[in-house]
Image (tube, rainbow, N blue to C red):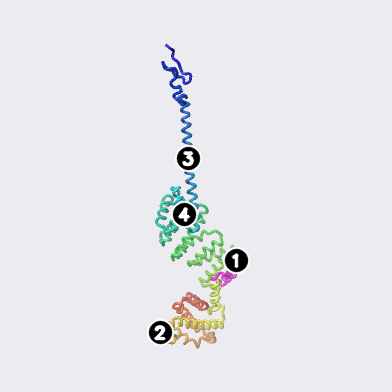
Amino acid sequence: MERDRRCPRCGQVIPWGETACPLCSEHRGYFWSMRRDTFLLVISVILILLFVATGFAVRSYHGREERLAWDWNKRGEEALQAGHADRALVDFRNALFHARDSPLYQLRLAQALAATGHVAQARAYLLSLQERDPGNGTVNLELARLAAGEHNISEAVRYYHDAVYCEWEGDAVARRRAVRLELVKFLIDSDQKETARAELIAVAANLPPDPELQTKVGALLSDVGGCDDALRLFRQALAAAPRSAPALAGAGECYFQSGHYTEAQRYLDRAVRQDGSLARAASMLATARAVLSLDPFMRQLGEQAKARRARLDFTQSLARLQACATQLGIDLKGAGGSRLQALDAEAVAVQPRAQVSHLRRDPQLLSYVMDVVFEIETATAQVCGEPRGQDLALLLIARQQEGARP
């Protein structure tokens, strides 16, 4: 019997009756001729290569999707900035198709939806984003704008306040200030001046030393009746920029509104000299000058000057009375007993004594004649509208004297 033989290639025993090793014979193929560890190594390398190739393909796919999403988003932002909200809406939808979980693209889509009037859909996206990130300032700001667009004051104020105290990228202080100023504008437009004034006082307390910003906030405060706080800001702005026409005009207007016409004239005159296009300041300057030239109660005036002014004021009020009556179709000498007719009768009765010589010697007569003037200017303003020029100046003097009386 032949002795057992071992295969010189794989080391396995060749069975009896076989002329060659069945494992290493040529009809088994190349892989069967390899040793087991070599075979496993080759299989492992192939699997690794397949894994790497698959990972590369996946990364390539996701990279392509991200690039497509970014390109669509860029196009959408350009369209939105150019005022083409409908086109931007399509672009943002495409961007979100390639990156469904992107908060940025969802926010952009919500903005486009809001711009195209799809408020309910925009709010749904924004509320979903807010639920995921309650501290996102931009999301809360967009929700505030939606509420403001629907004139929901309480909801708008709540979201604006949330946005003020949220996290912001970049200069957070400046972004929060901008949000609060946007809230102020909404409140002013909604005739919520007291609330707007409170917000502006909060803004004014934390302003940087920026004359332009101080003037802007001061002008808003002046619009809502906060002239004392506004004047402080205008003075701060003028300390850094003494020739700032807007700050000069703002300070002049504050003095004008508070009845300090001498100071108003000084600041408004400087403002108009710096910028002749300030029509509002120029109009106030003309009125302030008229007040200062017509007021017979100024302390520095002598008796003769007071009497001359009172006589001039009386003549001006009679012309205003007649013009108002003509506008309304009223015959001042006719029957009817209207307020204007009664004032005309009173003026006719006092007219013989409303002469400079009498007024200079009789202060009580001067006061009575000016009371008639003030009554005429007040009554005609009520029925014929706010006057202009000298009549407006007389009306302002009347209001000032009324406020000065105990």
Q: Earlier in the sequence, mark 2 or mark 1?
A: 1
Q: Are marks 1 and 3 in contact (CB under 8 Å)?
A: no
Mark 2 crowd level (few <14, some 14–19, many ≥20, 10 Å Cα)? few
- Mark whose residue sits in front, 3 or 2: 3
- Residue 247 in percent (x, y) is at 56, 66
| Residue type, label 3 | Ala
Q: Closer to the camera, 22 or 194?
A: 22
Which residue does the numbered mark 2 point to in the structure image? 337
State the CA–CA distance, disc 4 to disc 1: 37 Å
State the CA–CA distance, disc 2 to disc 1: 55 Å
| Residue type, label 1 | Arg
Circle 1 SS class = loop
Q: Quadrant of residue 307?
A: bottom right
State the CA–CA distance, disc 4 to disc 2: 64 Å
Locate residue 279 relative to residue 15 in the image: left or right: right
Q: Earlier in the sequence, mark 1 or mark 3?
A: 3
State the CA–CA distance, disc 4 to disc 3: 36 Å
- Mark whose residue sits in front, 4 or 1: 4
Which residue is located at x 49 percent, y 39 percent? 56
| Residue type, label 2 | Gly
- Mark whose residue sits in front, 4 or 2: 4
Residue 51 falls within the magenta-colored stretch:
no
Q: Earlier in the sequence, mark 3 or mark 2?
A: 3
* Span colored in magenta: 263-279
Which residue does the numbered mark 3 point to in the structure image? 57
